[in-house]
Amino acid sequence: MENDPEAYALLEPELEPGERLLWTGRPPSGLWSSSDILAWEVFSWAFGLIFAFMAGGTSSMMALDRGDISGAVMSGLFFGVIGLGSPIGTRIWDRAVRRRTCYGISNRRVLVRRGLRNATTMSYRLDQLVEVALREQAVGTGTIDFAKQRGGPRLNEHKAFPPSARKWPVFDRIANARAVYMLLDEAIAEAPVS
């Protein structure tokens, strides 16, 4: 299990005195799909196609009835771009956010840094995490979900799409997920109580 040097450099300034990073990593940066977003993607593509054909077709027919061929083409293109832009745009936006996201586990906290222009670092004290869940893939990658802090939402009460839009700590599709999960479990057991 290796540390990501760039993530380490970005997270190191966030550390408190006496705190040290045990692990750093990143989500994959490619255009990918997962079971988390499969249902959304199917709905999004179906809606996009229906919207493009129904709205674009209707407005195009209305323009053709008026004898406006260029209006028919433009309205069809307009509704086609809107209808199909949602699933495509969401994937591109999600990829851009993931490329600027990094994760860290210190001896005191879980850190998640993300941002396109203005980076935000979220940190959660290890002794305050109430649930930690590993969802592992056959290839060794996986997602580690954390319930927020005591009194916060529980796991599965706060789904978000795209995954990069989540407002709670999650290490999304990381390599060597089981080893990171075991390291996190050890860090939680040894964490000082605040």
Image (cartoon, rainbow, N blue to C red):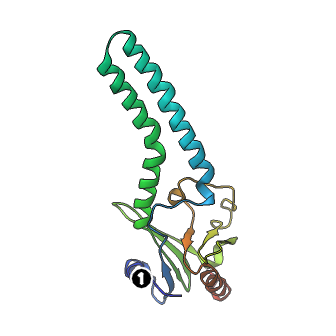
Quarter in which the C terminus is drawn: bottom right
Residue 59 image offset from top left, x and y in percent: 43, 20
The structure residue drawn at horizontal position 46% and vertical position 83%, both measured from the top left corner, is 16
The structure residue drawn at horizontal position 65% and vertical position 89%, both measured from the top left corner, is 190
Left or right of 80, for residue 147: right
- The vertical placement of 175 against 29, above or below, is below
Residue 104 image offset from top left, x and y in percent: 50, 78
- The vertical placement of 168 against 40, above or below, is below
The structure residue drawn at horizontal position 45% and vertical position 40%, both measured from the top left corner, is 84
* Residue toward you, 164 or 78: 78
Q: Residues within 10 Å of mark 1 (few under 14, many from 20)?
A: some
**Quarter of the rendering containing residue 109:** bottom right
Q: How many marks?
A: 1
Residue hosting label 1: 8
**Quarter of the rendering containing residue 149:** bottom right
* Residue toward you, 98 or 184: 98
SS assignment at label 1: helix
Residue 107 image offset from top left, x and y in percent: 56, 86
- The vertical placement of 191 against 173, above or below, is below
- Tell which residue pokes out farthest to the left in this image: 70
Q: Amino acid at mark 1?
A: Tyr
Quarter in which the N terminus is drawn: bottom right
Left or right of 178, for residue 112: left
**Quarter of the rendering containing residue 14:** bottom left
